[in-house]
Image: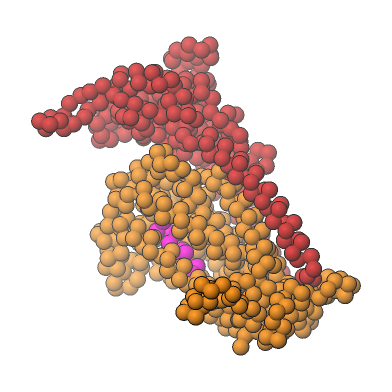
Chain colours: A red, B orange
């Protein structure tokens, strides 16, 4: 039975190799230098999460007053009034849309013309094209419509496994908002406005965009950087995932249905097989 | 395998159809009367789960096609339009994207099950090889589907994988240019990937038909790995027994699938794929979808590009030779202590390779991938020699005997014999399985 021990040793060696690979922090440390974002509390996290309308509206205010000067947000204006989002009243959405000037055309005589925006229009970009943005700012700022889903940070083993599971502390989908929140706090060097603790490589083209008191809040929420960071990250997550509330609501019904169905099928199967030794 | 068919049409229209195209009696003998070994466990429900997944992918895919634009400057935004503006578009897309992962999860479990219970052995070699072909087709389909999103990882993944063909001696670059339809991955590449991504699932469907046909010729393997000797004693009719058990398996699997769709829909995807493709900006780590990671690790483990490509394809191709590599007369790992240990080592090696594939190509992952790649092929290299050393356990003579041994002798006599489950109308027909 020397061969049996050999196969066992092989298996063990493989397992050990796998585990050392998993446990070795060296390679990951070089990959992810600096601190990792911390997980924040979000109203939209978890199986029953929903957006906080007031928070999304505050986040939109920050976008409109600060972010939109450089960043495009490629979503239709009408979505602000749709269910599951900031849910601005219809007249406000119309007034907001009309405050934008949209280039349209060509008209019957072949000319392009400017007209006031309509809710069905997309938010107009701050620059006509990425090249113009890069020329003005040094680098083209990314479109913000998906940025909250397009950013993540390394979780490492074994955390990444629990992130998928329906366990306490699991079901972690909000890495993007956590990263954005951390990034807005990451301008730690006063002498270098382009240094960020959380940005890969630490050199970020965007200078510190938000400071305490910069955007006025009318609902009594503290006008602090921390609050801004939370609100704008929430708003961006909604922009990237506007169907989240519908998805989670339907998901609950689907899971409940499937659980009941599975139970019924289990007992039916048991009954059918009860006369058969197997 | 029509041993138990008792299909006797009474309805006039059915009789009329039977005389012209006996499709109903065929369906009846294949999915109702078909004798199923009694001792199958839940690992055998993955065949039904995979059939379900294939159909789910085709249906969601066809709906997505109605809203998708296969053009390099529009593809990404058309996907976003599906997510935001198409009614239930988010559901279809998340179901399709996560469906690919679930499809691969199920196929890997299905393959490991075949490996464990020796389902590839005589007389099921063709059945097994058809499975390997389906797996290859699935990989091609999954890869091309991922490219259609036209995000950063789509584009750069396509660039890395199509570049593998440039390793072919002499004609490598010409072949790659031909595959691209240009001098880099671009609109022509996207167009042909779209066409093929739509075509291949139907090819898979056809090969699955052959796979099921081959299965119904040889009959199913089972956890004890002994052939059916007596249909009455060893088997139960497919319906309702297997139908119900498969239904339960599919429902439980759906719970997992729906958890991903509704609660963690982006967990298995790469965040970088939410950035539109940019040929001028390479992402820091180009990582394929999780289901390709073990093969990706083998590819990167070998310093020479051509040898790496060969090793990667060999890692899949070697599966097709399994029926002839494994020379043990005993099928099931249940009765093969050494093979059982080796099997679990192989599972650990495969998962380890997957982990290395996700990590950057740096130490210690390079060395670990090399060791694991050697162990991966080592498994197949050891198989032919295993019977020399292995002392197998006594195998039960029949399925009925195995079942008796498991449930204890007392379980059998008080119950009426399961013959009652077999159709009572045709007792004379069924002593032989396949004519």
Of residues B108 and B327, which is closer to you in this image?
A: B108
Q: Is residue A168 magenta?
A: no
Q: Compared to B28, does B164 lie above or below? A: above
The residue that appears at 55% across and 78% down in the rendered structure is B214
Residue in the foreground of this view, choosing between B321 and A32: B321
- The quadrant of the image that shows the C terminus of chain B is bottom right
Residue under the point 43% across and 55% down: B61
Q: Can you give x and y, in whole percent of width and height, for residue B31 in the image?
A: 60, 71
- Residue B1 picture location, percent across and down: 60, 81
Magenta extent:
B133-145
The answer to whether residue A151 is seen in the rendering is: no
- Principal SS element in the magenta part? helix
Whether residue B144 appears in magenta in the rendering, the answer is yes
Whether B417 is drawn above or below A168: the answer is: below
Q: Position of residue A3 (x, y in %)?
A: 72, 77
Residue B180 appears in the rendering? yes
Q: Residue at x 46, y 43 (%)?
A: B88
Q: Residue at x 71, y 73 (%)?
A: B236
Q: Nearer the viewer, residue B417 or B37?
A: B417
Q: Residue furthest left?
A: A109
Q: Quadrant of residue B241?
A: bottom right
**Across the whole image, how many numbered discs are drawn on residues?**
0
Res B407 quadrant in image: bottom right
- x, y (%) of residue B352? 59, 59
């Amino acid at each position: 039975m020397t061969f049996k021990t050999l196969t066992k040793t092989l298996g063990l060696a493989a397992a050990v190799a796998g585990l050392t690979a998993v446990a070795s922090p060296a390679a990951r440390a070089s990959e992810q230098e600096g601190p990792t974002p911390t997980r924040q509390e979000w109203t939209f996290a978890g199986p029953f999460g929903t957006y906080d309308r007031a928070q999304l509206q505050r986040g939109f205010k920050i976008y409109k007053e600060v972010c939109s000067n450089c960043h495009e947000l490629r979503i239709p204006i009408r979505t602000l009034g749709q269910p599951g989002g900031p849910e601005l009243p219809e007249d406000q959405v119309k007034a907001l849309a009309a405050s934008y000037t949209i280039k349209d055309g060509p008209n019957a005589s072949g000319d392009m013309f400017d007209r006031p925006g309509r809710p069905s229009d997309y938010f107009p970009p701050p620059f006509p094209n990425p090249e113009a943005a890069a020329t003005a700012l040094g680098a083209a700022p990314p479109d913000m419509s998906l940025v909250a889903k397009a950013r993540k940070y390394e979780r490492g083993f074994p955390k990444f496994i629990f992130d998928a599971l329906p366990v306490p502390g699991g079901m972690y989908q909000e890495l993007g908002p956590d990263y954005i929140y951390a990034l807005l706090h990451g301008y730690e060097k006063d002498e270098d406005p382009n240094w960020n603790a959380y940005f890969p490589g630490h050199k970020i083209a965007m200078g510190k965009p938000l400071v305490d008191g910069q955007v006025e809040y009318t609902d009594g929420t503290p006008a602090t950087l921390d609050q801004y960071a939370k609100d704008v990250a929430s708003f961006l997550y909604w922009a990237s995932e506007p169907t989240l509330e519908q998805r989670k609501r339907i998901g609950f019904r689907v899971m409940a249905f499937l659980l009941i169905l599975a139970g019924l099928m289990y007992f039916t199967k048991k009954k059918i097989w009860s006369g058969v030794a197997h | 395998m029509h041993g138990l068919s008792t299909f006797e049409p009474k309805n006039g229209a059915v009789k009329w159809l039977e005389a012209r195209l006996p499709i109903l009696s065929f369906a009846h003998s294949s999915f109702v009367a078909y004798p199923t070994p009694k001792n199958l466990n839940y690992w055998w429900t993955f065949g039904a789960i995979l059939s379900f997944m294939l159909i789910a992918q085709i249906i969601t895919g066809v709906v997505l096609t109605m809203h998708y634009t296969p053009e390099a400057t529009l593809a990404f935004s058309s996907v976003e339009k599906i997510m935001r503006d198409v009614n239930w578009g988010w559901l279809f897309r998340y179901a399709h994207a996560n469906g690919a992962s679930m499809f691969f999860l199920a196929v890997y479990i299905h393959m490991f099950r075949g490996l464990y219970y020796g389902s590839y052995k005589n007389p099921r070699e063709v059945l097994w090889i058809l499975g390997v072909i389906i797996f290859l087709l699935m990989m091609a389909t999954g890869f091309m589907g991922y490219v259609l999103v036209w995000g950063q990882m789509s584009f750069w993944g396509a660039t890395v994988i199509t570049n593998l063909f440039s390793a072919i001696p002499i004609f490598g670059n010409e072949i790659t240019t031909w595959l691209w339809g240009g001098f880099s991955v671009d609109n022509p590449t996207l167009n042909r990937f779209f066409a093929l991504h739509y075509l291949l699932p139907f090819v898979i469907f056809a090969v699955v038909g052959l796979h099921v046909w081959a299965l119904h010729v040889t009959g199913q393997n089972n956890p004890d790995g002994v052939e059916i000797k007596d249909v009455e004693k060893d088997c139960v009719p497919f319906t309702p027994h297997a139908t119900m058990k498969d239904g339960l398996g599919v429902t439980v699997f759906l719970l997992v699938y729906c958890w991903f769709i509704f609660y963690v829909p982006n967990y298995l995807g790469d965040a970088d794929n939410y950035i539109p493709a940019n040929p001028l900006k390479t992402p820091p780590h180009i990582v394929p979808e999780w289901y390709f990671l073990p093969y990706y690790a083998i590819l990167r483990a070998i310093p020479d590009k051509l040898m790496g490509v060969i090793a990667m394809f060999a890692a899949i191709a070697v599966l097709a030779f399994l029926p002839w590599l494994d020379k043990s007369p005993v099928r099931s790992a249940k009765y093969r202590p050494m093979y059982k240990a080796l099997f679990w080592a192989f599972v650990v090696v495969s998962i380890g390779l997957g982990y290395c594939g996700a990590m950057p190509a740096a130490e210690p992952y390079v060395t670990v991938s090399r060791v694991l790649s050697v162990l991966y092929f080592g498994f197949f290299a050891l198989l032919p020699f295993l019977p020399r050393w292995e002392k197998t356990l006594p195998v039960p003579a029949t399925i009925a005997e195995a079942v008796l041994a498991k449930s204890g002798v007392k379980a059998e006599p008080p119950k009426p014999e399961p013959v009652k489950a077999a159709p009572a109308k045709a007792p004379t027909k069924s002593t032989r399985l396949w004519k």
